[in-house]
Each structure stands twice: as structure tokens, then as C-alpha cells.
Amino acid sequence: MITAYSEAQIWLVIGLLGLGTFLIRFSFLGFIGQKALPGWVLRMLRYTPVAVIPGLVAPLVLWPPATDGQTDPARFIAAIVTLVVGGVTKNVLLAIVAGAVTLFSMLWLLG
Amino acid sequence: MTRTADRSAFLRGAKDGAPFILVIVPFAILFGVVATEAGLDLAQTMVMTVAVIAGAAQFAAVQQMVDGAPVFMVLATSLAVNLRMAMYSATMVPYLGAAPWWKRAVVAYFLVDQSAVLSADTFEREASRSLAWKLGYFFGVILPIAPLWYAGTLFGALVGGRIPEAFALDFAMPITFLAMIAPMIKTLPHLAAAVTSVILALLLSGLPFGSGLLVAAVMALIVGAGVEVAMERRATA
């Protein structure tokens, strides 16, 4: 439970988080607009998704907060299956379904 | 003519975005549940979910408030989690930068992981498409995602803690992200970038305010681009 925060402080966090997040999203698109970016920048930006998402997910896969940071075989195996099915079939939906089915099967088998 | 083009782009985006419904909904419900259990009232939960639309940062903010971190720490952590969106914003510049400013503002508001990643991938492969087509595609991707994000949060906030833990809703986000990214690792530079990102993010996960992820992502961009340049040199040599 949130005990250290007054109502006003909670609203302050919500407001500033919303505003700050919008400004981050608007940054380049809003203030640079049509001006051309240099070639090397464009080359790097093509790798944005594969540079951000794997690093975002890796700690959640290896040290899930739901198991207090202990590696969980069910979640780990489900992650590997999702990755393999997605890589082989190139089908996002199929990968999600395969991952979810694996997760529930493993939780049931191992749980 | 352009109207039909917009419409087909919109439908194509909606079709490409549709699979994410399966994971957006449980993830949104989970946020509603977690926020309510943390003590946020319905108005606070809903305003946050509409104003921020960024699951990971919202969870981070609620967790930090529960932990009693000072306001500026809560903001620093949560906004650092969202800094990757500056990269998404830059990624969209070559494709959508020519749109009028108010359309760019609307795009910016809806620039979430799913819309940015899917659009960047599609725009890169179909670079010759018109601006109107690209805008149509982007909003098509968002169509199934944003309303269900709001609705899922509302549902979660209303049902509160009545969803059993056995549903493992916490893992909806990792599975979505992995399913999105796996098909995009199609060349050696992409693989090199992804591996760099994973290794550095794990090594640097102890750094405060999610700054480890930022370092990992920037290094991964450099590695991806570097491997691409090296391969081009080798091919032309």
C-alpha cells in the first residue's frame, strides 16, 4: 500500500509522469520534424527495437519479480519457446500463443 | 484515391496490431489490479493509464510509491524507463517528420512499444509508401491497442485483487516483447545488437534508475550499425 504519499503528491506524480513521457515521445518527432538526419544516425536508429527490447526483457526473464527475482523454470522455458517460435515462423501471434501455452503447461507441471 | 490508400493502410495496420490484443488486455488488467491494491483510487489509476500509456513505467512508478521513494526519484526512475521512446521518436522522423505538427503530436502520444516497433519495421521494408499511407498504418496499429489498454485497466481496477496469481499475468509483457522481437532478428547485425543489449542489460541491471538499460541500448545500436558497416566493407572489398 502507498502510505508515504498524500493525495496531492500522487496526483503530482501522475501529472508529471504523463507530461514527461509525452515530451520524451514528442522530442525528435516534434522539434526536428522535416529536417534530414545524418546517414549514420539513421543507420543506428534502424536497430532501435532490437537494441532496446531484448535488454528490457532479459532481466524479467531471468529474474522475474513475481518469484522475487529467483529464476523460474516455467517462465524461462516459456520465454525460450516464444523466441524460437517467433524466429522460425515470423508470426507474432503464433509466438505469443506458443509462449502462453508453454507457460501455463510448465506452471501446471512444475507448480 | 488517397482516401482508399489511407483506408487500406489503416486496415493493414489494424491487422498487424491485432495480435497484441491478446497481451495488451492481460497486461492492462494487471496494472489496474496492482494500482488498486497499492491504494490508488479509480480516478488516479485511469488518469495515469490514459496520460502515460506506458506499462513498464506505470508499474515502476506505483512500485516506487509503495516503497516510499521521494517524488523526484519516482519520476527519475519511471521517465528513465521511458527514455527508449526518445529513440522511437527519432526513428519516426524520416517516415512521419513531414506531417503537420499536430499530427506529429498525436503520433507522439500514441508512440508505444508496439506501434513504434511494428511501424518502424514496416516503414523500413516499404519505404516508398506515401506519408498518408504511413500515418494511416500507424493509427491502424494503435486502433486495437490503445482503447483496450484503457478498458483493460478499468476492468482490472474494478475487479481488484480477485484474479488468481496462477494466471501469471506478470509474464504477459515479456512474452509479448519476445514475440515481437524474434521475427526482427533477421540479419547478423540485428543479432549482434540484440545479444549486446541482453548481455549489457544483465551486467548493468544493478545501476540505479534503469540507466543500465539505456547504456545497453546505446551500445547495442553502435554494435548493430558497426557490424553492418563492417559487412558492407567486406562485401565491396
Image (cartoon, coloured by chain):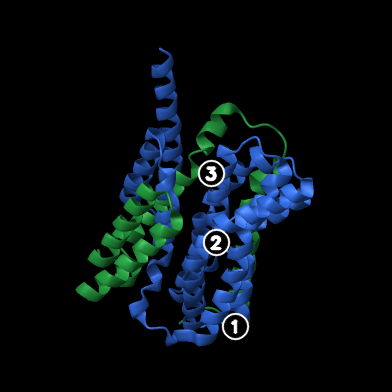
Chain colours: A green, B blue
Structural distance between the alpha carbons of marks 1 and 3: 36 Å
Residue B71 visible in this rendered orientation of the protein? yes
Q: Which dot marks residue B18?
A: 2
As shown in the figure, which amino acid type bears the numbered disc 1? Leu
> Quick one: SS at disc 1?
helix
Q: Nearer the viewer, mark 1 or mark 2?
A: 2
Q: Which dot marks residue B121?
A: 3
Is B174 placed left or right of B91 in the picture?
left
What residue is shown at x 55% (from left), y 61% (from top)?
B18
Asked whether the residues under marks 3 and 2 belong to the same chain, the reply is: yes
Asked whether the residues under marks 1 and 3 belong to the same chain, the reply is: yes
What residue is shown at x 72% (from left), y 47% (from top)?
B5
Task: Give the crowd class for mark 1: few <14, some 14-19, many >=20 residues within 10 Å.
Answer: some
Is A46 placed left or right of A72 in the picture?
right
Q: Quadrant of residue A102?
A: bottom left
As shown in the figure, which amino acid type bears the numbered disc 2? Ala
Mark 1 belongs to chain: B
Q: Nearer the viewer, mark 1 or mark 3?
A: 3
Question: Does B121 appear above or below A73?
Answer: above
Task: Give the crowd class for mark 2: few <14, some 14-19, many >=20 residues within 10 Å.
Answer: some
> Quick one: SS at disc 3?
helix
The residue that mark 1 highlights is: B42
